[in-house]
Image (cartoon, helix red, strand yellow):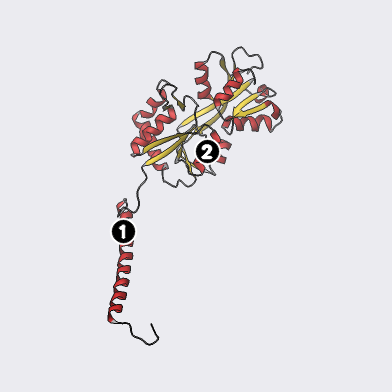
Amino acid sequence: MAEGQVPPPAALRKGAKGSTLAVIAVIFLVIGFVMGGLAGAPLFGWVKEKTSIVVGTNTPFPPMERRNTTNGNLEGIDIDLVNEIGTRNGWVIEWRDFQEWDALLAAVKFKRVDIGASSITMSGLVGAERNSSFDFSDPYYEADQAVLVKTGSTAFTCADSECTIDELANHTVATQTLTTSYYWVQGNLIDTHKTPDTMWTSFQSVNTVITELLNGQVDWVLVDKPIAQNYVAGNPNLRIAGTIETNELYGFAVADGDPLHLIAGINSALKAMRDDGTYARILSKPR
């Protein structure tokens, strides 16, 4: 349009109408978000609440989590707890089984899964390190570590029910990578030079760790006590030589900052399950 020309009336009407509609649209957007927030629900369908929750675990780690060899289903204490938590929150739980422990932890950290449920220690030095990457639910299980040896082994003995560092020193040992057991051996035996690092091996799977022991490749292995008890119950060639008191607490993990705001729902369900007896029934269920 040349300078000084007056726009025709039709153009003026069109411009006014467009501006008015834009203002009205903004007003509706603001009202929509405000009212949606006040009502506690999305308005106009712009925000869809996530009800399908992806949960990662790492098998085998019985009795906490394992895959049924007959039907292929996941089962165990963690599995039952999370499924019940999902039911009480109206979540559809989708499970993903990671064969490597560090892959599971990375998946939680980088939001490839929404919840990590796999006997994840949230306390002590290990928990302090993990708290920089994760947020945790309230603790739901307390465990110590157990020293597993082959039945009849005379490589060493623990004089008391609790093994000491000196009793375990200078004996070949295997652990599962990046678990509490791994960090205990590293911190108490390797870094202190009580045991040469050439006498220590670690593996991604706890089954491989147990196989190393049964094949005579190591003198002992360190695993969480409930897992050790489970293996001993199913294999007469294994026995618990003693325990190491760590009082570690398990928690369900989400990405740092709890981006989906899941922790409140998890904690509320855990409390209700303890109050109504469901938690005790799950823990006492034959495995």
Kind of residue at badge 1: Gly
Asked if residue 161 is positioned above or below residue 25 in the image, the reply reads above
Residue 166 vs residue 147: left or right? right
Q: Nearer the viewer, residue 66 or 186?
A: 66
Q: Nearer the viewer, residue 278 or 24?
A: 24
Residue 105 vs residue 92: left or right? right
Task: Please tell me how crowded label 1 is: few (under 14), some (14-19), or many (20+) other residues with Cα within 10 Å.
Answer: some
Is there a contact, CB below 8 Å, between mark 2 and mark 1?
A: no
Residue 193 vs residue 23: left or right? right
Measured as percent of width and height from the top left, residue 201 is found at: 64, 28
Measured as percent of width and height from the top left, residue 71 is found at: 40, 24
Asked if residue 10 is positioned above or below residue 177 in the image, the reply reads below
The kind of secondary structure element at disc 2 is helix
Please give the residue where the numbered disc 1 appears in the rendered image: 32
Q: Quadrant of residue 168?
A: top right
Kind of residue at badge 2: Leu
Residue 32 vs residue 261: left or right? left
